[in-house]
Image (tube, rainbow, N blue to C red):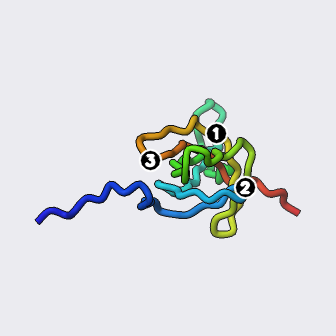
Amino acid sequence: MAVPYSSTANLPFGSRSLTINSVAYIAENWAPQKAARKISRPDANGDEAAFMLRADPTSQSGLRLQLATTSTATPALGEEFTVDNVVYVISGVSKSESVGAYHSCDVSYQSKVLPTS
């Protein structure tokens, strides 16, 4: 038996609700990534003798935001939002697209590098 399909525009699908600059969005594919960068130590011949992996605080992730209406503002570059006590900064925003009553935009973000004391 087939599962019924509902094309109702007010049935949001997403993995997380986000509030950015007091505007509510639904994130369709929330999956922040942590990357590492490799630091190599060459030997006398210039070959890699040892290496170390360090966390890369500038690794970027991306997601698609659902907008409530065509007049919903897209996030601006540099705006911040917090999820699970981690502050993220918007580093890229695409032009919003509409298909019928579905409005979305693609956003790239990275965790904010907080100064250490």
> Which residue lies under the disc numbered 2?
21
Q: CA distance from mark 2 to mark 3?
A: 23 Å
Circle 1 sits in a helix, a strand or a loop, which is it? Answer: strand
Residue 27 position (above or below residue 39): below
Q: Position of residue 4 (x, y in %)?
A: 22, 62
Residues at badges 1 and 3 in contact (C-beta under 8 Å)? no
**Residue type, numbered disc 1:** Gly
* Disc number placed over residue 101 in the picture, else none: 3
Q: Position of residue 56 (x, y in %)?
A: 65, 49
**Residue type, numbered disc 3:** Ala
Q: For the view shown, which residue lies furthest in the top direction?
A: 45
Left or right of 112, for residue 95: left
Q: CA distance from mark 2 to mark 1?
A: 15 Å
Foreground residue among 117 and 30: 30
**Residue type, numbered disc 2:** Asn
* Disc number placed over residue 11 in the picture, else none: none
> Which residue lies under the disc numbered 1?
92
Disc number lying in front (2 or 1)? 2
Q: For the view shown, which residue lies furthest in the bottom direction?
A: 84
Q: Residues within 10 Å of mark 2 (few under 14, many from 20)?
A: few
Q: CA distance from mark 1 to mark 3?
A: 24 Å
Q: Residues within 10 Å of mark 1 (few under 14, many from 20)?
A: some
Residue ID at (58%, 34%): 47
Circle 2 sits in a helix, a strand or a loop, which is it? Answer: loop
For the C terminus, give its image quadrant: bottom right
Q: Earlier in the sequence, mark 1 or mark 3?
A: 1
